[in-house]
Structure formats: C-alpha cells, structure tokens
Image (spheres, rainbow, N blue to C red):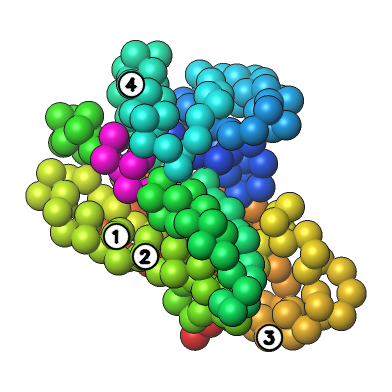
Amino acid sequence: MKLLENKVAIVTGAARGIGEAIALKFAEHGAHVAFTYVSDNSAEKANALTGKLTAMGVKAKAWQSNAGVFAQCESFVTDVLKEFGSVDICVNNAGISKDNLLLRMTEEQWNDVMQVNLNSVFYMTKQVIRPMMKAKSGSIINMSSIIGEMGNAGQSSYAASKAGIIGFTKSVAKELGSRNIRCNAIAPGFVETDMTSYLKEGENADKYKAGIPLGRFASGEDIANVTLFLASELSAYVTGQVITADGGLYM
C-alpha cells in the first residue's frame, strides 16, 4: 500500500542524511519529490538521488537553492508549482550546526545557524501555505531536535533555533487547522549522518549509546518513517505536535 500516491512533496536539504532518507521513503510510497541542495559540492549527490527517485517510478527534480534566503525560497516554490502543479507536503529539513561555548560564540556563528535552521522554516512555510490553502489540504513537517527540548552545553545557537521551530510549528498549526493544513515537528535524537559522524566510534559513541534505552543511534530511515506518518493520512487528526524520535534518550 502506497501512502503518498501522486502527492507532491518538497524536501529541503535532501542531498544527503535525513533529507535523502525522507526523499527515498516518500518516493517508495508514490510521492513526486522536489528537493533542494545548497553547495556545488552536493550537486553530484543530488543528481544521483534524482536518478534513484525517478527509477522508483515517480517524478523528481533537484534545485540548488538556499532555504535560508527568502528570495530563493520564493523562486523555488514558484518553480515547483510550475513543474509539478501543486505542493501537498513540505518537509523543512535544511539545517546546520556551528557549535561553540557561548563565551566564544561569534555573532556571525549565531546568525548563520538562525538563518539556516529557523528563518528557513518561516521562509518555506510562507511560500507553501498559499497553494495549500487553495487546495484546502496540506502537511508541513519541521525538523527540530531533542537539543531544542533539552538544551546542550556548547550548542546554545542550535538549541535556540530548534526550540524556535517548535513554537513556530504550534502557532502555524493553530492558524491553519481550519484550512485542513496540518503542521507538526519531529525532534530526532542522535542520528547517524555526516553531521554526527564524530559520534559513531570510540568512547564518545559508547557514552551516548549508554544513555539511550534502545541502545543505538537512529538511522535516517528511522526518522523518515516518522516523517512518512506525518505526511500521510495516517496522521489526519495530528497537528501541532512534536514527535520525539530519540530511542528514549529524553523522557
């Protein structure tokens, strides 16, 4: 059973990691996928992902677009509507971290994280809600983090940006629920991606895994499965929620 048959989904920051896993999961369930990547270095991966998606029998296209720039988000969504005809699902997944102790953190580091992690969610959501309102249907899924719920030393900017996403999500859900547009957030714990590669081996990995009741880090597919649930009609009565997918780390 394909849960997203002929739906059109946008996924930001999908050339690798969690975003790539989400794009593949959506295509597996019949969704057409428009996704973004930022740097020239990711172009090869983006092209490879496009090939994988189209081989699954869906329409797919990659855009080099920075979700942290309002004008680029506007142009991207306009292009998607021209190319795909609609937007049913928007996954705001683009994100970065520039960790530092607050005493040493620069204004530039703080602003960069806010721009990509938090501002991008506002920019993209603002662009997709108009076609969703016209269709009287839509699912917006914002990628937060357990760090936004529990905080972490050396990650004040990351934590603040991810906590901001939670407040934004709940507000949007209240604004748009009457239009049958749902907005939810996912708060992953430690996920095996390039961003967390330094945690995969050695004493650090053992230390973190010891605090996780399920005893392992999440895979990209673990998070993609939660995203699929929120994108599909299985969650038709779920909005304004934060699903924490962390193996039981934060309870």
- Which mark is on residue 78? 4
* Tag 1 residue: 168
Tell me the element at label 1.
helix
Amino acid type of disc 3?
Gly
Decide if residue 242 is on the left or right side of residue 131. Answer: right
How far apart are the alpha carbons under marks 3 and 4? 45 Å
Amino acid type of disc 1?
Phe
- Which mark is on residue 164? 2
Q: Are marks 3 and 4 in contact (CB under 8 Å)?
A: no
Q: Are marks 2 and 1 in contact (CB under 8 Å)?
A: yes
Tell me the element at label 2.
helix
Q: Position of residue 111 (x, y in %)?
A: 48, 56
Q: Nearer the viewer, mark 3 or mark 4?
A: 4
Q: Residue at x 45, y 50 (%)?
A: 115
Q: Which residues are magenta?
A: 121-128
Query: Can residue 149 be seen by looking at this rendering?
Result: yes
How far apart are the alpha carbons under marks 4 and 1? 23 Å
Observer-nearest residue: 177 or 108?
108
Q: Residues within 10 Å of mark 3 (few under 14, many from 20)?
A: some
Residue 175 in the magenta stretch? The answer is no
Establish if 186 lies above or below 54: below
Q: Nearer the N terminus, badge 2 or badge 4?
A: 4
Q: Nearer the viewer, mark 3 or mark 2?
A: 2
* Tag 3 residue: 211
Q: Position of residue 223 (x, y in %)?
A: 56, 56
Amino acid type of disc 2?
Gly
Q: Position of residue 137 (x, y in %)?
A: 21, 38
How far apart are the alpha carbons under marks 3 and 2? 26 Å
Observer-nearest residue: 115 or 138?
115
Decide if residue 62 is on the left or right side of residue 176. Answer: right
